[in-house]
Image (cartoon, rainbow, N blue to C red):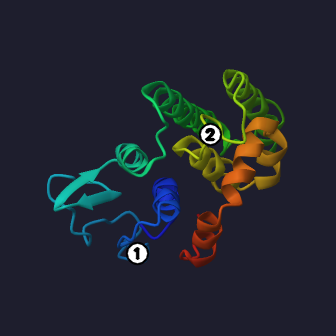
Amino acid sequence: FGRRGVAEDIRYMLAMAKVPYEDKRFSFSFGVPGDFSTIKRPERVGRVPILEVDGVKVGQSKAIARYVASKYGFAGASAIEAFKIDCLCEHVVDIKATYQKVKGDGDEAKAKYFGETLPGELAKVEKSLGDAKGPWLVGCKPSRADVVFMVFLTEFFDNVEGAKAATPPKIQAAIDAVSALDAVKGWKESRPQTPF
């Protein structure tokens, strides 16, 4: 859809790898809200986002992200690094789920989330990094994990300042390092302007 959403980490990695691609998006302005009958669903895939490579269409954002990371050098230098990167990305899935449970519960619940829950969850992730030298979360170059954490902690929440205050130093260093890359800055400046 015409939003950043679950495909944004993929778009960042493609920008970082300097891979040209066609970014087709469905408009949010069609029909009655929730009426998707005006969309021609891709055969066999049935959901978006979809990546088409050499005539093969594959859906599911996480599968696409893993493919792009593997193909373009964002999946680590070894199987162990790839394992760690995937683990970190799954932590983000889990942390997002904790937010989904409280985001509609009012200001007090959100304040507790940003003051206690999110800092606690991120502290666990930070501890799992062990002796990572940084600024990257895994290894000695940017990975999918760095991109996923950047997107999550700078673009997912309405309360960006609350997310930043909750972010521990190693994770913040990775976010800062990814955000400073020319390709990342270029994508942020040139991408379609959407509310989320």
- Name the spot of residue 151 as percent of width and height, x first: 61, 53
Quarter of the image where one finds residue 124: top right
Q: Which residue is mark 2?
A: 140
Quarter of the image where one finds residue 184: bottom right
Whole-number angstrom distance, CA of label 2 to CA of label 1: 39 Å
- Name the spot of residue 112 as percent of width and height, x first: 81, 35
- From the viewer's side, name the closer residue of 102 and 161: 161
- Name the spot of residue 196 as percent of width and height, x first: 58, 63
Looking at numbered disc 2 in the image, what kind of residue is underneath it?
A: Cys
Quarter of the image where one finds residue 70: top left
- Name the spot of residue 86 as percent of width and height, x first: 48, 33
- Give the answer, above or below, for where 192 lies relative to 60: below
**Sequence-wise, which precedes: disc 2 or disc 1?**
1
Q: Which mark is residue 27?
A: 1
Q: Is residue 31 left or right of residue 91?
A: left
- From the viewer's side, name the closer residue of 59 and 177: 177
Q: Is residue 120 left or right of residue 185?
A: right
Q: Which mark is residue 124?
A: none
